[in-house]
Amino acid sequence: MANSTADMRLSGGHPALDLANTVDSRRGRWGPDFLRSFDDLLVLAERLDLVDQQAAARLRRQAENDAPKAAAALADALTLREAIYRLFLSEDAGEPHLIADLRLVEDWARRGRAHQILAANDAGYAWTLPFDDLHQLVQLFAIKAVDLLMERDRRRAVRECTGNNCGWLFIDHSKSGRRMWCSDASCGSRARIRRFRSRVKGT
């Protein structure tokens, strides 16, 4: 069982969904929460290749030198996470997005867009954040969420895992478009075991 963002499964298929999945369970029970410090958020961004080593070291030093600001950035990240979760949960349910959640994500993304710079990379050039402020990590996840929302007509659907004590979100890349579990090896396997035990008990 995972204990933090350092060892949680990355099953979402997109950074915004992996942020939403930093709560171990959302069905049947809630928690535990993997985002307990700003460093947990930074570790997730590192695992998703959203920040390089230099940027991560810079942000980590800032967090260590300004604990109140790190705590504020974490609180904003948690609020953003829940808005992202509700937005894409509504997609799976075929319901309209909550305007308040949409505006919150939009606001953080706008702040991030205003600070983006054009930087060279191995593929040429790309927009990126300078990461000279702790809240830019929050802004980055908001930008990723907006990108995912805008790609709705060009990507596969986002689903909610129906596994017991899960509820994680993931992009459904299955051929049928009816995948039920965030991970076949974990939630899928447990579901099959429960069905088998139920059949055995019934006979």
Image (spheres, rainbow, N blue to C red):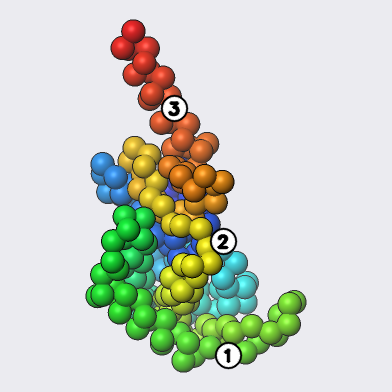
Mark number, residue 117 = 1
CA gap, disc 3 and disc 1: 48 Å
Is the Cβ of the residue at disc 3 closer than 8 Å to that at disc 1?
Answer: no
Q: Could you say where residue 31 lies in the image, as x and y percent from the top left?
A: 31, 49
Dot 2 falls on a residue whose secondary structure is helix
**Eyeballing the image, is 79 above or below 119?**
above
Pick the front one: 130 or 117: 117
Dot 1 falls on a residue whose secondary structure is strand
**Eyeballing the image, is 134 above or below 191?**
below
Q: What residue type is labelled 1?
A: Ile
Q: Residue at x 44, y 60 (%)?
A: 17
**Eyeballing the image, is 199 above or below 8?**
above
Residue underneath mark 3: 192
CA gap, disc 2 and disc 1: 22 Å
Q: Which amino acid does label 2 sit on?
A: Arg
**Eyeballing the image, is 200 above or below 166?**
above
Mark 1 crowdedness (10 Å alpha carbons): few <14, some 14-19, many ≥20: few
